[in-house]
Image (cartoon, rainbow, N blue to C red):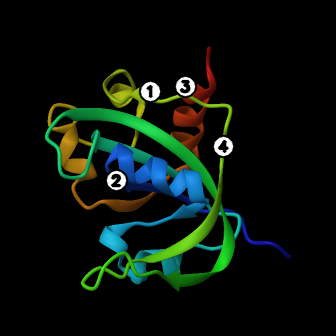
Amino acid sequence: MQEKPVYWLAVASRDHVLAGKEKSFVQVSHGKPTSLERMKVGDWIVYYSPKITYKGSKACQRFTAVARISGEDVFQVSMSENFKPFRKKAEFLENIHEIEVRPLIPELDFIKDKEHWGLEFRNGFRQISKKDFVLICQKMSAD
C-alpha cells in the first residue's frame, strides 16, 4: 500500500530552482542531505524564490516551480572542491507559471503572521498542508 504523499515547501533562488528543473533534481537546505532523506517517492515540493539569483540582491518573491519526487536515493555531486551538495531526482511540472507570493498570503495557512510573512520562509524547508499546496498549484496553473 502506497503512503499518502507529503507536501513540502523549499526556498531557493530562482536561478538554482531553474538549474534543478533543467536537470530533473531537487536540492534543498544548501545541499545538506537531512531534508532530502525525509522526502519519499511521490511526495510533492513547491519552490519559493526570494531572490532572482543566489549571489544577487534583486528580489523575486515568487513561487517558481513544482515537482514530484521520483527517486528514492539521495545522491551527492561535486560542484567544486568545497561544495558537494546532495540531491534527489524529481519530475517538474511543465504547465505552470511563476506567481507572486503576496496575493496568496491571506489564504495560506502556513503563514501565521500575515504582516511579517517572510519569517515563514526563513527555515528554507518545511512541510505544508495539502490545502496550501493545492492552492499554490491552482494559482500557478491558472491562465
- How many angstroms separate mark 3 from mark 1 (CA)? 7 Å
Amino acid carrying label 2: it is: Val
Pinpoint residue 91: horizontal percent, then vertical percent: 67, 56
Q: Which residue is mark 4?
A: 93
Q: Which residue is mark 1?
A: 99
Q: Residue at x 52, y 35 (%)?
A: 136
| Within-10-Å neighbours for mark 1: few <14, some 14–19, many 20+ | many
Per the image, label 2 sits on a secondary structure element best described as strand
- How many angstroms separate mark 2 from mark 3 (CA)? 18 Å
Per the image, label 4 sits on a secondary structure element best described as loop
Horizontal side of 135 relative to 126 (left or right) equals right
Horizontal side of 10 relative to 117 (left or right) equals right
Q: Which residue is mark 3?
A: 139
Amino acid carrying label 3: it is: Lys
Q: Quadrant of the N terminus?
A: bottom right
Q: Quadrant of residue 108?
A: top left
Q: Which residue is mark 2?
A: 11
